[in-house]
Amino acid sequence: MFAKLARTGVLAASIAVAGCNDSSMKDFAPEANKPLPDKILADMRAKGMVRTSSVMARIFKEEGKLEIWKAKTNGRYDMVASYDICKWSGKLGPKYTEGDRQAPEGFYTVRPSQMNPRSNYHLSFNIGFPNAYDRANGRTGQNLMVHGACSSSGCYSMTDAQIEQIYAFGRDAFQGGQTEFQIQAFPFRMTAANMARYRSDPNYEFWKMLKVGYDNFEVTKVPPKVDVCEKRYVFNQVAADGQTFNPTGPCPATTQPDSLKSAYNAYQSTYDAAFNSALKASVPPPKPTIAGIKEASIVSDWSKRRARGERVPIDPPSLNTDGSVTETARMGRIDSPAGRKMAALDAEKAAKQKAEEQRLAAIEAAKQAKAQALAEKEAAKAQAVAAKEAAKAAKEAPVATATIAAPTEAAPAAETQAASADESRVTKLKNKLLGMFGG
């Protein structure tokens, strides 16, 4: 029976074309039939579990953990294994739209038909996105898996050795009669400290809603009954006779066991006190989260262009709090015919741009050389004129010297003439005196 259901899972996976594309042509998958290790089986027996008892899984993105819980003989669940998630894509926050590379958050259901023993990713199972909540809120995507190969484009990826064990837990539970198991996917462990850290995040209201389901499991250690009405999750609610839960319609009148109410309220009182204390405490800064449908749409467009083989940044873009978009400078391309054509066009464009830059550089160099030659010519001309003026000045220098020296050479003649005049006056005075005194 299980083999038949597994083949159905292969068919379902082969039809899908998006998300972690998980079709395969493998005819035989011995890894899907590996038994759990003896140590795990021994731990299960020590906790009051049998190999084929019911199972559920919890995922915590920030902590990078996938937990496996199994039912004990008393009906309550206990954790039997914990694995480090090898890779998950996107940021903290839900998946909004196909191509946003977000790993989903929420409450999902896995049935035997979703198990794929012949996966391209060693082994896998589809977590069931979109569920009723996702569809009611217009969220899209397909082929969201937990799988091996440690590679993710919106999935939760494990190592091959890990997925063999995780797959075996589901396989054994189905063989024991469980018809479906629950996967609870959270952004982080929903403790008071973590909720206080992210209280200003745009996804906070969504996370508060998930926390109700988280708390119900913490209180009861039994997977909560999950329904959707008014486009929101409701947990462990029983609709009144004749009423049903409509994901997009109003919630029906519901009831809940008094014992559960009492236990939940006591748990909530303790949480509230811890939350108020955490508001005053020093806590690590929050991790990056997706900024709603706007950022999801930006990443989705990047994914579509990348799938077409266009040259896009190697990492998805991010939307900043101020509305700007950050893209990495490093570029990448899918190796496809379209990608190779795009690469050739890019190379041709780059060659033309380089040639144009070289041409402009050559023109600029020629201009500078011409300007330098002209400057040198003008300098040489000025130097020649200066030399000519110097030579002329040197030639005229002796004449100017003689003219200046002439008064000096004529000085004796002037002195002689002055002396002669004085002598004449003396002679005249002498003769006059002789005449007066009869001499």
Image (cartoon, grey):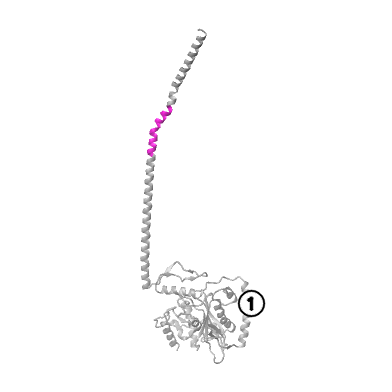
Could you tell me residue 120's position as x and y percent? 42, 79
Tag 1 residue:
273
Secondary structure of the residue carrying numbered label 1 = helix
Could you tell me residue 21's position as x and y percent? 42, 79
Would residue 389 be seen by someone viewing this image from the given angle? Answer: yes
Residue visible at 40% across and 32% down? 397
Give the residues drawn in magenta, as a range. 387-405
Q: Is residue 67 magenta?
A: no
Tell me which amino acid carries mark 1: Ala
Could you tell me residue 360's position as x and y percent? 37, 58
Residue visible at 62% across and 78% down? 272
Depth check, front residue: 404 or 94: 404
Could you tell me residue 23's position as x and y percent? 41, 81
Q: Callout 1 environment at 10 Å: few (<14), some (14 to 19), or many (20+)? A: few
Q: Quadrant of residue 388?
A: top left
Q: Is residue 393 magenta?
A: yes
